Amino acid sequence: MDKKVLIVDDSKFWRMVLQSILEKLGVNQIIVAEDGTKGIEIALKELPDVIITDYNMPGISGLQMCLYLRSIPAFKNAGIAVLTGSDDVINEFWAEHSGANKFISKLLSKDVLEKELERFLSGDYASSKSKEMFYVTSIYDVLEQKMRTEILNREILSLIQFARDELYVIQQLKNFLEFFSRFTGLAFLLLSPVEGRIYNFGLPLSKMISKEKLLGSFERPLEPSNWSYFGNFGSEFKVDGLETVVIKYQESEIGLIAYTNPTDRWSLNKVLNEANESISLLFNTLNIFRELKVASTVDGLTGLFNKKELLRFLEETHNLAKINKTIYYVAMFDIDNFKKVNDTYGHLVGDEVLKGLAAILKEEIAGKGIAGRYGGEEFCLIITKVSNTDEVVDLIEKILARVRNTQFPHGKCTISCGVVSSEGYESPTEVLKAADDLLYISKKTGKDKASYMFLPKNNVLLSQAQHQEQT
C-alpha cells in the first residue's frame, strides 16, 4: 500500500499496536508522533495521506488536531480517523463538524479493529503535495492561518447585511480583493434562474462576449430569463490572461469571479481559497434577494415590470424631473381586438401574444427607459433617456411597425398608443391619465396608431388635432 500514514497517540502501547496492524496490512510508509502538537508538526512536514489519531491526549486533543489540519488546503482530501476510548464522550455536533472521516473505538477486538482500519485505508484519501496548496510549516503557522481565515471570512460575511443593495456589496467585495492584488480587469457574475448579472471593472469585452466568456467557465451553466450588465463594457472580442474562479453553493454553480493580470496571484488565490465558503454564502444571499425582488416587481407572464413597480418608478422619475427641471415621456399601449383573440384562439394563444409584444417593447426601450405591463393587454413605457420629441415619435412608430409586421401565433396583430410628455403636469398620476386619454383617442379614431401630446395639458385636443393633420 503506497499511502503514507501518520499515527498519533500518547500511549506507547497503542502506537505499537497500530503500527503492527498497519505493517500487517501492507503499509510501507508509517510515521509516529506521541502527542497532538508533534503530530501537527510532523504532518506539516511529511504530508501523510492518512492520519490515525487518539482522541484524548494531553495538550492538543485528536479533535483539535483534526480541526487544525482540515483548515489547511493540503489536507482537504486526506483521511483522518479518530480513536476513542471508554471514557471519551464526544458531542455529536462537534463530531460531525470536526472534519474526521471516521471514529473508531479502542474497545474493539484486535481482529475487528484491524478490519475497520483496513476498510478505512482502502478509501480514496491523499494529501496535496502542491506548493500552492501548502503554505504552513509549524503549528504556530496553523494558528495564525486560522486567525487569518476567520478575519477574512468575518469581513466578507459582514457584507450580507447589505444584500438588498447588490451593487454596493459587489463594489465592497472588489475593494476587499484589491487589498491583496491589483488587476487590469475584474468582473463578477452572479447567476440565478431569474436573472444573470455581470459587474465589470475594467474588462474591455463587449456585453455579449463577456457573458459568453464567463459562462464558458461553468460546467452546467443556467440560462436565466433576463440579464443585467453593470459597469463600462468595451467592444473587444477577446482578452489575454483571463482567469476565473467559479463559486458554488451546495454543488450548484451560482457565480464567478474573473480577473486579468493580478499583481500578486499567490496572495489572491490564497484569499479566494480561504474565503470560498463565505463568498459562496454571500453570492447565494444576493441571488435570493434578487429573486425576491424580481418576484415582487416583475410580471410573471411577460417578464416586464408589473403595475406596482411601474407606478413606483413613475413617481420617482416625476420627482427627479421636477428637481432637475427635465422632461420624461409616458406611452400607453393596448392590443387591438385582444378579446377576439382570446375568444377565438383561447387564452394560451392570447398569452403568447402578450409575451410577444412584451419582447418587442423590452428590446426597443432598452437604454431609453423601462417597459411594464399595466394590466390585462395594456402596457406602458416610461421614456427617460431621449434627446427630443422626434426621437420619441421614431421609437413609438418603430414599435407600431414591428408589431404590425410580426407573425404572432394566431396571425397578425396591431396596437394603439397614447404618448405624452411630463411638461406642465403636477403629478405622475396626471401624466399617466393624459397618456391613457390619448390611447383612448387612438382607439376611437381607427386603432393601429399613436396619438401624441407634447404640449401642456390644457392643449391636449389641440395637440392631437395638429398631429392628425400632419399624418
Image: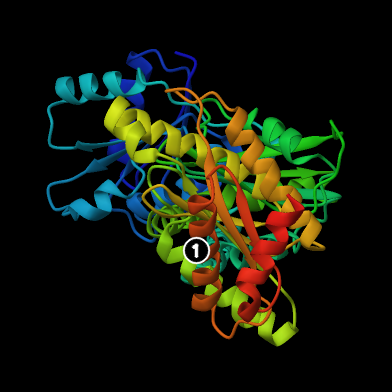
Q: Quadrant of residue 350?
A: top left
Can residue 187 be seen in this snapshot? no
Callout 1: helix, strand or loop? helix
Image point (27%, 19%), residue name:
119
Query: 466 and 282: which one is in front?
Result: 466
What crowding class fits label 1: few (fewer than 14 Cα within 10 Å), some (14-19), or many (20 or more)?
many
In percent of width and height, residue 51 lies at 41, 35
User: Count the marks: how many?
Assistant: 1
Q: Quadrant of residue 424?
A: bottom right
Query: 116 and 361: which one is in front?
Result: 361
Image point (55%, 39%), residue name:
359
User: What residue is pinned by disc 1?
Assistant: 436
Instruction: From the viewer's perspective, tell me whether residue 19 is left or right of residue 237.
Output: left
Image point (72%, 65%), residue name:
175
- The kind of residue on which mark 1 rests is Asp
Q: How is the image coloured?
A: rainbow
In percent of width and height, residue 128 lies at 58, 31
Instruction: From the viewer's perspective, tell me whether residue 15 is left or right of residue 139.
Output: left
Instruction: From the viewer's perspective, tell me whether residue 206 is left or right of residue 130.
Output: right
Can residue 114 be seen in this snapshot? yes
In percent of width and height, residue 281 lies at 46, 54
Up-down relation of residue 286 to residue 336 (above or below): below
In percent of width and height, residue 278 lies at 50, 56
